[in-house]
Image: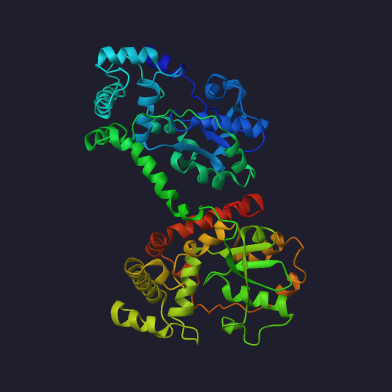
């Protein structure tokens, strides 16, 4: 009983998870260092961002912890709500090889001399110089087998943070709900994450040269075999799962970050004599945008606003990235759920001159679609599921360029706009956000908006809330998960900063 009371009243104080995070003096950015996951480079980057110069110690910055700022004074809730709190994960196989060549076999100034000697005696690790790939593989097998025991606390040596699981480090800040980046995608993921609050992040990343990278005598493929990879992935199973989840999350953004050459151009709708350009994506205010640009250019409405997509009705410009940056250049994105219901009521269930009766007919014949007036909410729900099944089949059987633009993922149509640095706006806040980024540079823009009442919007017998079911929401998310991620990224930036994110 006394022991229980002592445990109750003398329970160790829980360490504030924010204390484990680094932050900047210059911006509300929060980083959890994980050893052997680019932490040397990132600590040097944080120092550079606050001091505009590299740390004098460089590779040995870990020994100068007082020169970096811990987030211990930051409220946990601020970090939890921040879109700029992150950790960097690494492929456990690459991390293991880096540990082996950098700290265990390597004989540089930062290796673990005592651990090397211990492992040579304990598990017969071969530390002779000029080993061939087979000998390194044998060393790695011996080492990973020993790590399996060590991480299970079955050796006489404590777990070292250089080989501690990444997942165990993350568990200590689990309550902060931070974003996971990947080391192999850091060069483009970090600017994407922090560009809103650190506009010069790319330049700083290029300026920082200090990273703890050891040259390896053999390529990964020469040392690894299936058995060794299997052992590493078993010992670090949770790490592999987290890394793969993070990689999958960032996968949709990969296509947006190839460099744009100086002479490469992007074709945009424009209004001659006005520095305004847009990439108009189907089912995301495209009719409205083209009519708006037409009024700006001609100072009058197009004679048939809903048919403005007729060839020759709009002016086009081919712009370099530099030219686009010097003008008001943008694209618009939309909540995928709203876009789907617009497709359903406007093109599939609707019977106007711009509807798709051939799609409706196929759905009626093959998917139980009901194409009649005065349907119940439940009938519309069944129709929506039929349409989602049809779209899913198209995604599975057609290549991306062949998919109808009305239901093609908007991220695919936005990729080039993002590469060229066009500013993303939200359809639901289009007018106010466009006026914001125009900043008075487009004469007559507000007047043109007031003169442009036409939106290609079909009447809906039920609201989105009345038709949307968990099953429909899940199916839309399955088909348009990347669109949803892009939409949330842009919406969050506008809501929190009042500006579009730098994608």
Q: Position of residue 79 (x, y in %)?
A: 56, 38
Residue at the spot 33% in from the left edge and 12% down from the top edge: 117
Colour scheme used in the picture?
rainbow
Q: Quadrant of the N terminus?
A: top left
> Camera-side residue: 284 or 274?
274
| 229 in relation to 339, above or below | above
Q: Position of residue 437 (x, y in %)?
A: 69, 59
Q: Position of residue 328 (x, y in %)?
A: 68, 62
Q: Is residue 497 left or right of residue 124?
A: right
| 55 in relation to 181, above or below | above
Q: Quadrant of residue 228?
A: top left
Taking the view exactly as shown, the residue that stands out farthest to the front is: 130
Q: Is residue 115 left or right of residue 66?
A: left
Q: Is residue 240 left or right of residue 33?
A: left
Total labels drawn? 0
Residue at the spot 29% in from the left edge and 31% down from the top edge: 235
Residue at the spot 62% in from the left edge and 83% down from the top edge: 305
> Camera-side residue: 270 or 376?
270
> Camera-side residue: 413 or 491?
413
> Camera-side residue: 47 or 220?
220
Q: Quadrant of residue 225?
A: top left
Residue 40 in sight here: yes
Q: Quadrant of residue 409?
A: bottom left
| 89 in relation to 458, above or below | above
Residue 78 in sight here: no
Q: Position of residue 121 (x, y in %)?
A: 27, 12
């Amino acid at each position: 009983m006394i022991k229980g009371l002592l445990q109750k009243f003398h329970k160790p104080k829980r360490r504030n998870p924010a204390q484990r995070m680094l932050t900047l003096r210059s911006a509300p950015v929060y980083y959890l260092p994980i050893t052997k996951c680019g932490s040397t480079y990132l600590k040097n980057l944080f120092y550079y961002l606050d001091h505009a110069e590299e740390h004098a110690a460089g590779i040995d910055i870990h020994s100068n912890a007082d020169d970096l700022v811990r987030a211990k004074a930051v409220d946990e809730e601020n970090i939890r709500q921040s879109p700029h709190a992150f950790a960097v994960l690494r492929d456990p196989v690459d991390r293991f090889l880096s540990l082996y060549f950098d700290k265990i076999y390597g004989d540089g100034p930062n290796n673990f001399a005592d651990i090397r000697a211990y492992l040579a005696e304990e598990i017969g690790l071969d530390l002779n110089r000029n080993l061939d790939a087979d000998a390194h593989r044998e060393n790695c097998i011996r080492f990973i087998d020993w790590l399996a025991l060590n991480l299970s606390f079955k050796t006489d040596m404590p777990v070292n943070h250089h080989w501690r699981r990444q997942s165990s480090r993350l568990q200590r800040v689990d309550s902060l709900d931070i974003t996971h980046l990947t080391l192999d995608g850091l060069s483009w993921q970090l600017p994407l994450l922090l560009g809103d609050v650190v506009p010069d992040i790319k330049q700083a990343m290029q300026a920082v040269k200090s990273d703890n990278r050891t040259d390896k005598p053999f390529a990964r493929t020469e040392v690894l075999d299936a058995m060794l990879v299997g052992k590493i992935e078993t010992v670090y199973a949770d790490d592999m799962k987290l890394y793969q989840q993070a990689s999958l999350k960032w996968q949709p953004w990969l296509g947006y970050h190839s460099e744009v050459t100086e002479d490469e151009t992007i074709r945009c709708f424009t209004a001659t004599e006005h520095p305004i350009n847009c990439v108009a994506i189907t089912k995301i205010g495209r009719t409205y945008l083209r009519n708006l640009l037409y009024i700006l250019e001609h100072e009058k409405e197009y004679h048939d606003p809903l048919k403005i997509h007729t060839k020759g009705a709009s002016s086009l410009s081919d712009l370099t990235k530099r030219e686009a940056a010097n003008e008001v250049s943008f694209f618009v994105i939309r909540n995928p759920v709203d876009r789907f219901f617009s497709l359903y009521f406007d093109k599939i269930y609707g019977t106007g001159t711009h509807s798709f009766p051939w799609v409706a007919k196929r759905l009626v014949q093959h998917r139980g679609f009901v194409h009649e007036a005065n349907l119940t909410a439940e009938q519309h729900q069944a129709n929506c599921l039929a349409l989602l099944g049809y779209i899913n089949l198209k995604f599975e059987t057609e290549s991306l360029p062949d998919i109808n633009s009305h239901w093609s993922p908007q991220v695919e149509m936005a990729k080039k706009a993002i590469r060229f640095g066009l500013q993303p706006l939200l359809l639901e806040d289009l007018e106010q956000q466009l006026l914001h980024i125009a900043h008075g540079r487009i004469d007559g823009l507000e007047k043109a908006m007031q003169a442009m009442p036409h939106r290609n919007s079909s009447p809906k017998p039920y609201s989105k809330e009345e038709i949307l079911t968990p099953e429909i929401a899940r199916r839309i998310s399955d088909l348009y998960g990347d669109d949803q991620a892009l939409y949330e990224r842009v919406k969050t930036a506008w809501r929190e900063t009042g500006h579009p994110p730098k994608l």
